[in-house]
Every structure is written in structure tokens, then in C-alpha cells.
Image: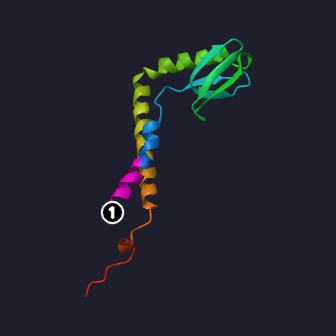
Amino acid sequence: MRPHPYLGLALIALLLALPLAAQDKAPVHRLILKDGSYQMVTKYEVKGNRVRYYSSEREEWEELPNSLVDWTATNKYENERAASASSPEAVRLDKELEHESEKAEAAQRSRHLSLLPLRRSEREPRSFP
């Protein structure tokens, strides 16, 4: 018995959609360090002289010394971000960015599908007498 011809295509589409569905929509924060750099994190906790955080870039828990974090700059950034998030202009820009991101993801999915090998019947042009 031969499998349905679209079963493979449906399976590939499902596999491509899994990473998108698995993305955590938790808000991203910045832990600003004293050297001016920052770590993008979804959550963090202070335990003694260590800061334990979940890196949104590497998707794993990491630690660093509390003394390396510029808490004044980190809190200032979070307060400014919260204040600007409620402005109408920020809401409009967020919607535009989200729309552009969705368009880019759709284009990437279609590129993946276009790279799939064609069935033999689709590769060879049909000739009609």
C-alpha cells in the first residue's frame, strides 16, 4: 500500500511549524553589566552574590557574579521601557514590527517548502500528442 502523496508534505509543514509554536512569548529583559554590555534574559533571580538568569539567546540557565551587574542601569532601562510601552506610538510601532516579523517568517517557510524535492511527475514536463 502506498502512502498518501500529501502525507510527507503535511509532515514537513508540521515540523517547520513546531519551532514557531514552541517559542516562548515571555517578555525579554536586559541585565546591563558594568562594562556596558548586556544579557538578554527572560527571567532572573538573585541568589546571594550570584545572579541566575535564563538567556533568551542561548535558551539555557546561566550565572554571573552579582557585582558585574549594573543594577541602577538595569532598573532605569526597565522603567523607561515600561513607560514607553504604554504610549500610542510605541503600540503602533510594535504592531508594525510584529507584522514585518510574521511576513519574514512566512517567507522563510515558503523558501523551505520550495527547496523540497519534486516528485518525478512534477519534474518532467508532460507532452501531449
60 drawn magenta: no
Relative to residue 61, is residue 17 depicted above or below?
below
Mark 1 element type: loop
- Mark 1 is surrounded, within 10 Å at the Cα level, by few (under 14), some (14 to 19) or many (20 or more) other residues, namely few
Residue drawn at (49%, 18%), measured in percent from left and top?
82
- Label 1 sits on what residue type? Pro
Asked whether residue 101 appears in the rendered view, the answer is no
Estimate the x, y position of residue 24 in percent, counting from the top left. Answer: 47, 31
10 drawn magenta: yes
Q: Residue furthest top?
A: 48
Asked whether residue 30 appears in the rendered view, the answer is yes
The residue nearer to you, when weighing 99 against 15, is: 15
The residue nearer to you, when weighing 106 against 53, is: 53
Number of numbered discs visible in the structure rendering: 1
Estimate the x, y position of residue 67 in percent, counting from the top left. Answer: 74, 16
Residue drawn at (48%, 21%), measured in percent from left and top?
84
**Quarter in which the C terminus is drawn:** bottom left
- Relative to 95, is 37 on the left or the right? right
Q: Specify the quadrant of the image occupied by residue 121.
A: bottom left
Residue drawn at (44%, 46%), measured in percent from left and top?
105
Residue drawn at (31%, 61%), measured in percent from left and top?
4
Q: Specify the quadrant of the image occupied by residue 61.
A: top right
Estimate the x, y position of residue 51 in percent, counting from the top left. Answer: 66, 18
**Quarter in which the N terminus is drawn:** bottom left
- Region in magenta: 5-14
- Relative to 72, is 82 on the left or the right? left
Residue occupied by mark 1: 5
**Prevailing secondary structure class for the magenta stretch in the rendered image:** helix
Relative to residue 54, is residue 82 depicted above or below?
above
Relative to residue 28, is residue 4 depicted above or below?
below
